[in-house]
Amino acid sequence: MFTARSAFSTIGRRAFSVSAQQNSKVTVLGAAGGIGQPLSLLLKLNTRVSDLALYDIRGAPGVAADISHVNTASKVTGYDPAPEKLKAALEGADIVLIPAGVPRKPGMSRGDLFKTNASIVRDLAKAAAQHAPNAKLLIISNPVNSTVPICAEVFKSKRVYNPKRLFGVTTLDVVRASKFISEVKGTDPANEEVIVVGGHSGVTIVPLLSQSNHPSIDGAVRDALVKRIQFGGDEVVAAKSGAGSATLSMAFAGSRMADSLLRASQGETGIFEPAFVESPLYKEDGCDFFSSKIELGPEGVKEIHPVGKVSPYEEGLIEIALKDLAEDIKKGQEFVKSNP
Ligand SMILES: NC(=O)C1=CN([C@@H]2O[C@H](COP(=O)(O)OP(=O)(O)OC[C@H]3O[C@@H](n4cnc5c(N)ncnc54)[C@H](O)[C@@H]3O)[C@@H](O)[C@H]2O)C=CC1
Ligand SMILES: O=C([O-])CC(=O)C(=O)O
């Protein structure tokens, strides 16, 4: 029989636990979209979530009514687009996930989404800074390399910025990396751990295969695998042929990230997720933000792990990534300065 427990206990080692109870409010902004709906459903199945608040510019009450019939204990509320509704959705939130904004179509880069999504994310960040300044903010909207710096600038301008609580969600890159490497090696993806560092678009996504279970992967096989991980999003965009980008795998990845933060907030230790956070690792290269292995704790970021020993090939990939990443980050920071 299908139950929440059986569905999630078999996904793999890093899937979320479903038996623990926790009083926590999780808010999804953009909850009626392609990611928002399955993400909200997965959060409804997570027993660590007691209050699920769903907000969108259209359709959130309907999604909430639908999901609220799932027989888990949490309360689900849908909010229409109005300032007081957004306030109610955000107040008291422990975690706020933002998948609001437009997705790519074939031929577009994530950077092409900036002109639409920058102001959407800025405005939602303003609301979060005002009504949920202590929540952990998980940014899914692309381009993540720029939308995370946008949120940081907004929070700084409101004097509530805490870098430990702002995350660009790059979980999908490690989910893909472990799946793709398992396909090459004929292994169980649940046993594959691959660190992915950098940012979240094309060449800024840098998988460190030398630190995986298969450090000897080399040559054309390595090159193809790295390329597939870097451009995994494009595979889905092409397959959906105009109907959007990854939604279901992203919902899975986003719910895993939220669950990891909830577990860490209850004092569970040894929880690591990659995430695009303010980081000291490459500040000198103009990258105030960088994704690497992060240990999570009750406050959010507990420890940012260095990239560690990498191969000369990976050193080259990181060098290429830093150049694009610095530009993407600056673009987000400057956007808020000129469009406060
Ligand atoms: N970080 C990552 O790994 C990934 C990020 N994404 C990004 O996530 C974003 C969302 O993708 P989809 O869900 O497929 O798009 P979608 O178009 O299906 O859904 C977006 C939702 O946001 C809502 N929205 C728009 N403006 C809003 C506002 N001001 N306030 C509240 N809600 C608002 C829309 O009404 C819609 O329901 C895109 O930018 C996409 O590129 C997608 C996949 C992976
Ligand atoms: O490719 C896209 O535009 C969506 C995304 O970020 C991903 O799937 O990794």
Image (cartoon, rainbow, N blue to C red):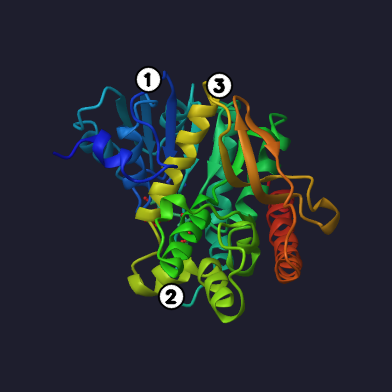
- Name the element at disc 1: loop
Mark 3: few/some/many CA within 10 Å (<14, 14-19, 20+): some
The percent coordinates of residue 218 (x first, y second) are 61, 74
Q: Is residue 242 above or below residue 140?
A: below
Query: Which residue in the protein does label 1 denote?
Result: 21
Q: Is residue 43 above or below residue 323?
A: above
Q: Quadrant of residue 89?
A: top left
Per the model, the C-alpha gap separating discs 1 and 2 is 42 Å
Mark 2: few/some/many CA within 10 Å (<14, 14-19, 20+): some
Q: Which mark is residue 106?
A: 2
The percent coordinates of residue 52 (x first, y second) are 36, 29
Residue found at x 29% / y 44%: 59
**At label 1, which amino acid type do we have?**
Gln
Residue found at x 39% / y 75%: 238
Q: Is residue 122 above or below residue 286?
A: above
The reply to whether dot 1 and dot 2 touch (C-beta < 8 Å) is no
Between marks 1 and 2 in the image, the one whose residue lies nearer the viewer = 1
Residue found at x 45% / y 34%: 259
Query: Which residue in the protein does label 3 denote?
Result: 267
The percent coordinates of residue 294 (x first, y second) are 64, 41
**At label 2, which amino acid type do we have?**
Pro
Between marks 3 and 2 in the image, the one whose residue lies nearer the viewer = 3
**Which mark is first along the chain, 2 or 1?**
1
Q: Is residue 30 above or below residue 83?
A: below
- Name the element at disc 2: loop
Which residue extends farthest left?
1
Mark 1: few/some/many CA within 10 Å (<14, 14-19, 20+): few
Image position of 206 (left or right of 333):
left
Per the model, the C-alpha gap separating discs 3 and 2 is 43 Å
Q: Nearer the viewer, residue 8 or 42?
A: 8
Image position of 40 (left or right of 184):
left
Q: Nearer the viewer, residue 307 or 151?
A: 307
